[in-house]
Image (cartoon, rainbow, N blue to C red):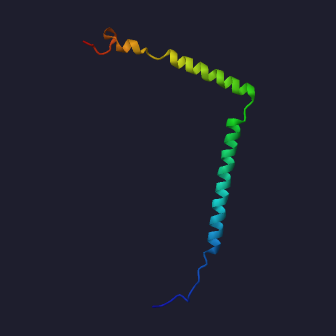
Amino acid sequence: MDSDGGNIVNFSSYKKTSRAGKKRAAKQEKEKTAAANRVRFGRTGAEKKREKIEAERRARLLNGKKLDDEAADSPGKGGPARS
């Protein structure tokens, strides 16, 4: 059993750098989230109004493309025949 002279390993410096790295990464993530929120919620009144009008237009277009429920239920329109 030959020993290597009893080298001592100190992990405290590793813990410090590891902890600092985690803190740095968390701070960067928070900054990215804050930047995204500024873009998302930091809008002028005109931008909000334009977006609302655009959302209503998209909803109208989508509703115009929907099939009627009555057409699917009637026997002559491709729905199941009822007796």
Residue closer to the observer: 11 or 3? 11
Q: Is residue 19 above or below residue 59?
A: below
Image coordinates of residue 3 in percent, x first then y, are 50, 89
The residue at the far bottom in this view is 1
Quadrant location, the C terminus: top left
Image coordinates of residue 68 in percent, x first then y, are 43, 14
Q: Residue at x 62, y 71 (%)?
A: 14
Residue closer to the observer: 80 or 8? 80
Q: Is residue 10 above or below residue 40?
A: below
Q: Is residue 48 above or below residue 38?
A: above
Q: Is residue 49 left or right of residue 73?
A: right
In the figure, residue 46 lies in which quadrant?
A: top right
Quadrant location, the N terminus: bottom left
Q: Is residue 70 left or right of residue 51?
A: left
Q: Is residue 11 above or below residue 43?
A: below
Q: Residue at x 51, y 15 (%)?
A: 64
Image coordinates of residue 17 in percent, x first then y, are 65, 67
Q: Residue at x 70, y 43 (%)?
A: 35
